[in-house]
Image: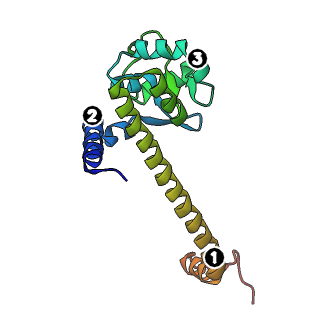
């Protein structure tokens, strides 16, 4: 069990993490690309307080730590989409490089490559944000499933009611008029 001093230090570390990078700031930097929640190298570099080129160099030096499911390099088309959505201000801001996008596991691996105190604190906050996003998405999936189940049940129970409502809403049928002369 932690003693009083350790608890005090843990609380101080928590407040330091929150001060360095609020979770809301990270939430705005996580995107869905190729079906994965990712954060771009330029945004991670910004959060870490390093230049994007320095981050990319460290990643290249430690390529074995970043398999495809940890990091992907965006295509030209994907980068253009991000520019058009104002995720990236302009192609020029990429510095002639296509950005890397890191999954949650890739971000965790970055902490072993960039070993500064700030990187550690930022990584903790990024990991918490990814976990929060997972919880939110699972809640939405559960809600979606429940609504679909209710709709199926609702449709079966009220089929007669829907048919009656549709009949009432339909314009009244006009009696057929015969064209021509009537002979008695």
Name of the residue lying farthest toward the top: 96
Q: In x, y percent, where is residue 170?
A: 57, 75
Q: Position of residue 82 (x, y in %)?
A: 46, 27
- The residue under label 2 is 20
- The numbered mark at residue 123 is none
**Quadrant where the C terminus is found in the figure:** bottom right
Q: Residue at x 50, y 57 (%)?
A: 140
Could you say whether the residue bearing mark 1 is in a helix, strand or loop? helix
Kindly identify which numbered label has been placed on residue 153: 1
**Image spot of residue 126 (x, y percent):** 41, 37
Can you tell which of label 3 and label 1 is closer to the viewer?
3
Seen at 40% across and 26% down, the residue is 44
Query: Mark 3: which secondary structure?
Result: helix
User: Viewer-proximal residue, 70 or 162?
Assistant: 70
Write down the residue under mark 3. Answer: 63
Secondary-structure class at tag 2: helix
Contact, mark 2 vs mark 3 (Cβ under 8 Å): no
Q: Is residue 70 visible?
A: yes
- The residue nearer to you, when weighing 18 against 41, is 18
Closest to the observer, 2 or 108: 2
């Amino acid at each position: 069990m932690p003693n009083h001093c350790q608890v005090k230090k843990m609380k101080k570390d928590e407040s330091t993490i929150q001060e360095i990078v609020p979770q809301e700031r990270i939430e705005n930097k996580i995107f869905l690309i190729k079906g994965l929640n990712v954060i771009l190298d330029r945004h991670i570099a910004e959060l870490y307080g390093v230049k994007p080129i320095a981050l990319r160099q460290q990643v290249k030096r430690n390529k074995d730590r970043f398999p495809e499911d940890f990091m992907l390099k965006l295509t030209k088309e994907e980068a253009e989409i991000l520019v058009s959505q104002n995720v990236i201000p302009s192609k020029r801001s990429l510095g002639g490089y296509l950005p890397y996008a890191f999954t949650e596991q890739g971000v965790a691996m970055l902490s072993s490559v960039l070993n500064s105190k700030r990187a550690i604190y930022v990584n903790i906050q990024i990991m918490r944000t990814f976990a929060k996003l997972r919880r939110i998405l699972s809640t939405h999936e559960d809600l979606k499933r429940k609504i679909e189940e209710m709709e199926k049940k609702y449709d079966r129970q009220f089929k007669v009611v829907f048919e009656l409502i549709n009949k009432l809403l339909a314009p009244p049928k006009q009696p057929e008029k015969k064209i021509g002369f009537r002979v008695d």
